[in-house]
Image: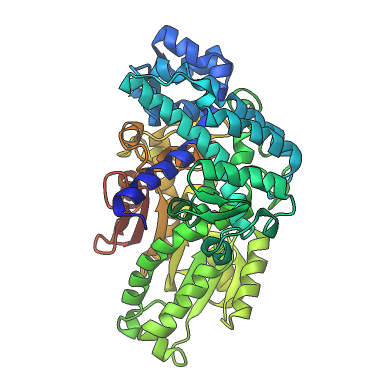
Amino acid sequence: MLNNQEKSTLRERLFRHIDGIAVAPVANALHTTGITQVLLDEKKLSIANIAERFHGNEGYLNVALHVLASQGWLDLDIENDVPVYSINEKSKIAFDHFYLYDDIIELMQFSENYHPRKFESEPFKELSKIFNKYKKNYDLQLSSDPFTSEIQHQILAHIEGNIVGPSVVHLGMSGMFHKYFMETRFKPEEFHKHPESFTTLLDFFTFLGWFNKKKDSYEFTDKGLFFARRASAYGVTVSYIPTFRKMNDLLFGDPNILRINQTEGDEIHVDRAMNVWGSGGAHSTYFKVIDDVIINIFNRDIESQPKGILDMGCGNGALLQHLYEVIESQTLRGKMLEEYPLFLIGADFNEAAIKVTRANLISADIWAKVIKGDVSDPATLAQHLLEDYGIILADLLNVRSFLDHNRIWEYAEEKHKSTNAKNTGAFASRGLRLTPSLVQQNLTEHFEKWAPHVNKFGLLVIELHTISPQLCSQNLGKTMATAYDATHGFTDQYIVDIESFHNAALDSGLKVDRILFRKFPDSDIATVSVNLLKGF
C-alpha cells in the first residue's frame, strides 16, 4: 500500500509524462530547424522576428516557444503586446539535450500508418529499440552537477512519458486494466494475441517497477496499480498525437494542414473516441461540484426555479442524464415533476453526438429534446427552441462543460479594446498570432451573446484555464498546464486564466456567484473552474 508521499511522487511523475508528450514534438521541431541555436546566439528575440527569419506561422511558433517557457527553458516577456523570448541559465543545457527526443518523434511519425489501438509488429519493433536505449539512459553521462542533472532527468521523464503514455492508453481502452488483471497474476497470452510483443512491453513496465515477474507470469505492483488506475489521465494528451505529428507543417508550412480534406464531423487533429475516454474520469470530480449547485437551484421555491436545463455540447448525453437523476432523487423539484415537468434539452454541433445522446436518453427512459446547436450562436438556438417547441431559452438553466474555449473564432469589435486582459497565454487562429487582449475581447463578446439568455437563471459552466509560463515552470510535476497549452494552442482553442475569464464575464454584464465558485486545484495553479454566471 502506497503512503501519501509515495502517491505524491508518482503523481508528479505522471504529470511529467504528460508534459513530455506535448514537449517532445515541439522541442524536436525547434531544434532541428535551428531556432534554438539562433536563440542561443541572439539571446533575446521577439516572436515576430523569429517568424520572419524562419518563414514560419507566427501564431503556432508562439505556442511552441510558450511551451518551452512553461518548462523553464526560456523566459517570456510581453513588449507592446508582442511576446519576446530570452534565454536563461537552463536554455543551453536543455537545448543541448533535445537530440534525445529524435527517436520518439521518428516513431510518432512512423506509427501514423498503423492502427492507433493495436500493438502492430512493425512499429512495436521500433518501440522495442527505444525501450533498450531508455534502459541505458541513452548512454547519457548523467551529470554530477545538480542543475544539469535536473534538466537531464526532466527530459528523460518526457521520453518515458512518450513510451508509456500511448501504451497505457491503448491498454486501458482495450480492457487490460480490468479487475481480473489487476488482482491476479496473468500470462501475456491471456490478454494479447501477440504474446511475444506484449511480453516485451510488460518486461519494460517491469523495469519501471509496475509489475513483478515470476517465470512467465506478471503481477501488478502498488506502483503499477497507481498508474493503471489513472490510465485515463494520459488519454486527452495522447489523443492529440495526430496534431503533434504535423508539428513542422503547423510551424513552417500550411497552417490549415489539419483541416485539409476534412469533412463535417470528421476530425483529423484528434482521436475523438480516445479524447472522450480520457476526459471521462477527470470530469467526474467536477460533476460532483455541479451536483451541489443543481440541488441548490432546484430546492428553491418552485416559482424561482428554471423550467428545465439546456446542456450545450451534450456529447453522449451523460451529463444531462446525470443531472436529471440528481434532480429527480435529491430535490424538491424531483417530487413535483408531474405538476412541474422538467424540460431537458441537449444541443450539440456534431450530428453523431446528437444521435448518440438521443439514443442514450431514450434507453434511460428520459424525455428530452436533442437538437443541433452552436455555442457561438445562441440567438439561432433560441429562435429554434421557440419556433419549434415553444420553449424560451431564458427560462432554462444553461449548462456546459469545457466548451467555451472551443468557440468559433471571430474578431472582436473595437468597443472592448484594452479590456483588462493580463493573461500570458499563447493563442492562434489558422497560424496567425492572436494577442491575449484580443482573445479576451472575443470572450467578452461571446458572453454578451449569451447574456440575454442566462440573465435570469444563469450559466453553469466548467471551464479549462491556463496559467503563466513562469508559474508553470515553478510547479512542474504539479500541473498539466504545459500539455493543455500545447493541445489547445495548436488547434485554435482559447483557454485563458481564471481571472481573465471572470473579467470577460463581468465586462459582458454577467456576475460570478462567488459562493458557488470552485477551482481545481484550490490554489494559484488552478486550471479548471466551476462557475455560475448570472445577470446583475
How many marks the image carries: the answer is 0
Residue with the most extreme front position: 215
When the figure is inspected, residue 181 is found, relative to residue 116, above or below; the finding is: below
Q: Nearer the viewer, residue 63 or 434?
A: 63
The answer to whether residue 251 shows anywhere in this view is yes
The answer to whether residue 260 shows anywhere in this view is no
Q: Position of residue 47 (x, y in %)?
A: 45, 20
Q: Nearer the viewer, residue 99 or 300?
A: 99
Apparent side of residue 352 relative to residue 143 in the rendered image (left or right): right
When the figure is inspected, residue 232 is found, relative to residue 496, above or below; the finding is: below
Apparent side of residue 155 relative to residue 479 in the rendered image (left or right): right
Apparent side of residue 239 relative to residue 434 in the rendered image (left or right): right
When the figure is inspected, residue 460 is found, relative to residue 392, above or below; the finding is: above
User: Can you say which quadrant of the picture contains the N terminus?
Assistant: bottom left
User: Can you say which quadrant of the picture contains the C terminus?
Assistant: bottom left
The residue that appears at 54% across and 20% down in the rendered structure is 99
The residue that appears at 51% across and 48% down in the rendered structure is 234
Residue with the most extreme top position: 41
Give the colouring mode of the picture.
rainbow
When the figure is inspected, residue 375 is found, relative to residue 496, above or below; the finding is: below
Q: Position of residue 495 (x, y in %)?
A: 43, 44
Image quadrant assignment for residue 358: bottom right
The residue that appears at 46% across and 79% down in the rendered structure is 325
Q: Position of residue 210 (x, y in %)?
A: 49, 48
Q: Position of residue 58 (x, y in %)?
A: 52, 24
Residue with the most extreme bottom position: 338
The residue that appears at 60% across and 31% down in the rendered structure is 132
